[in-house]
Image (cartoon, rainbow, N blue to C red):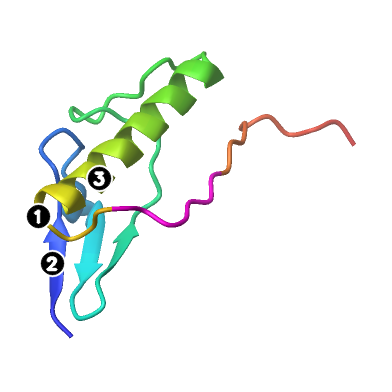
Amino acid sequence: MSKTYLCPCALFPSQQYGFSQAVAAMGRTTVYLSGQVAWNAAQQITGPADLGEQTRQALENLEIAVKAAGEHGLISCPCGCTSWVTTSTTPDP
């Protein structure tokens, strides 16, 4: 099964960290996207103190990765997505 590694220019260059933003497996094409965070293409966090802005950036990054797969003719319709939004605050005991 051949694979296509996708790293759209509008997302940060993740290869230096050992992963691709998205990977498409050929045959019955399946596209796997990496976890997206609030980094922009310049590796700067968007809205450091604004969880809403960070969430918007992470979802925009997800959209960019999905569109990259579509531009390569790899997908026409995503069929599932799981999202988690967390804070770094530790709850009181």
Q: Name the secondary structure under disc 3.
A: helix
Question: Percent position (x, y) of residue 33?
Answer: 33, 55
Q: Name the secondary structure under disc 1.
A: loop
Earlier residue among tags 1 and 2: 2
Instruction: Judge whether 48 appears above or below 89 on screen.
Output: above
Q: Residue furthest bottom?
A: 1
79 falls in the magenta region:
yes
- The residue tagged 1 is 72
Earlier residue among tags 2 and 3: 2
Which numbered dot is residue 4? Answer: 2
Task: Decide which of 71, 16 is in the foreground and name it.
Answer: 71
Instruction: Assess whether mark 2 and mark 1 are in contact (beta carbons under 8 angstroms).
Output: yes
Which numbered dot is residue 42? Answer: none
Q: Could you tell me which residue is drawn at 16 percent across and 46 percent down?
A: 68
Q: Could you tell me which residue is drawn at 26 percent across and 78 percent down?
A: 28
- The residue tagged 3 is 65
Which kind of residue does numbered mark 1 sit on?
A: His
Instruction: Judge whether 6 appears above or below 66 on screen.
Output: below
Dot 2, crowdedness within 10 Å: few (<14), some or many (≥20)? Answer: some
Instruction: Assess whether mark 1 and mark 3 are in contact (beta carbons under 8 angstroms).
Output: no
Task: Decide which of 51, 2 is in the foreground and name it.
Answer: 2
Which kind of residue does numbered mark 2 sit on?
A: Thr
Q: Could you tell me which residue is drawn at 19 percent across and 30 percent down?
A: 41
Q: CA distance from mark 3 to mark 1?
A: 11 Å
